[in-house]
Amino acid sequence: MTTLGGQVIAEESTLIPQLYAHEELLALLGAIAGLDAVPVRDPLERHVINVLHKPGDTHGAHTDDYPLALVLFVHALADPADGGLLEYASRAHHLSALRRSGTPRRAHRTPGDGYLLASDTTPHRVTPLRRVGLRRTVLNCAYTTPDRQQAVTPSAARLYRRDP
């Protein structure tokens, strides 16, 4: 996976930072999520572009530091059998939920699609690309609440512990 961080995006684009901080978008996201959605102060974490472009490329199982992720698809795979699918376990809080659930929920998207994810409480990953010539490119915008500006990265031990 190739990642382009928020600081580079802000240097190279005026559109993405303007869209990210647009008051009406913040109000819409907040209304959907039932939160007081605000931009993340950390310029690196605000928005990221993730590109999967080689066979086996994936975005491994994780939860995010901030409560909301708006993910917009620039490139997506036409055939779900090619990989690049979002896998998630809603509001599970632990990555082990992706393994325990037997068959995690999966979502296939096409270019122009997007989704809003409760990314701090929903373990999620992207399935590996299965062949040469594929590309999955997303713009991931992180949002938080006024009282959660500090990123709290859980320890690896907590993320991977087995639930009783």
Image (spheres, helix red, strand yellow):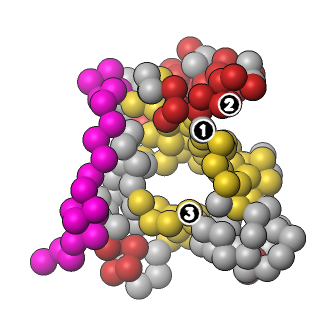
- Image quadrant holding the N terminus, namely bottom right
Q: Position of residue 54 (x, y in %)?
A: 75, 70
Q: Residue at x 33, y 72 (%)?
A: 97
Residue pointed to by mark 3: 59
Q: Residue at x 52, y 32 (%)?
A: 44
* Magenta stretch encompasses residue 50: no
Element under disc 1:
loop
Q: Position of residue 91 (x, y in %)?
A: 34, 57
Residue pointed to by mark 2: 9
User: As rendered, which of 41 and 21 lies closer to the eye?
Assistant: 41
* Chain part drawn in magenta: 145-164
Disc number for residue 145: none
Q: Residue at x 30, y 30 (%)?
A: 150
Query: Which corner quadrant of the image does residue 52 belong to?
Result: bottom right
Q: Is residue 116 visible?
A: yes
Element under disc 3:
strand
